[in-house]
Image (spheres, helix red, strand yellow):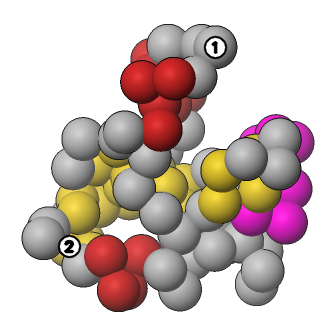
Amino acid sequence: MRVFTREELKHYDGRSGVAYVAYKGKVYDVSQSFHWRSGRHHFRHHAGCDLTEALKQAPHSPEMLEKFPIVGELVD
């Protein structure tokens, strides 16, 4: 499993077609999701970021991420 720093994760912002997000130390590939087109999710959240805090306020549960492949882990 690949290890990502926050700086490395920023490179997967969806602009090149690859969109990764982190949640509680896991990095998910959301590239194939319609909701993450161009690396943005409903104009509020951006790929290439840690969404751990943001998902506390989301209208859905974090379990939504479970349908996406885990591609690594985020380290500080």
Q: Seen in the image, is 20 located left or right of residue 32?
A: left
Q: Which is more toward the observer, 30 or 24?
A: 24
Question: Residue most toward the left?
Answer: 76
Q: Which is more toward the observer, 1 or 28?
A: 28
First along the sequence among labels 1 and 2: 2
Specify start and end residues of the magenta stretch as a single range. Answer: 32-39
Answer above or below: position of 67 versus 34: above
Q: Seen in the image, is 30 located left or right of residue 11?
A: right
Quadrant in the picture for residue 1: bottom left
Which residue in the structure is indicated by mark 2? 3
Q: Residues within 10 Å of mark 2 (few under 14, many from 20)?
A: some
Q: Residue at x 73, y 47 (%)?
A: 44
Which residue in the structure is indicated by mark 1? 59
At label 2, the amino acid type is Val
Residue 34 in the magenta stretch? The answer is yes
Coordinates of residue 37 in the picture (x, y in percent): 86, 56
Quadrant in the picture for residue 13: bottom right
Q: Residue at x 74, y 63 (%)?
A: 39
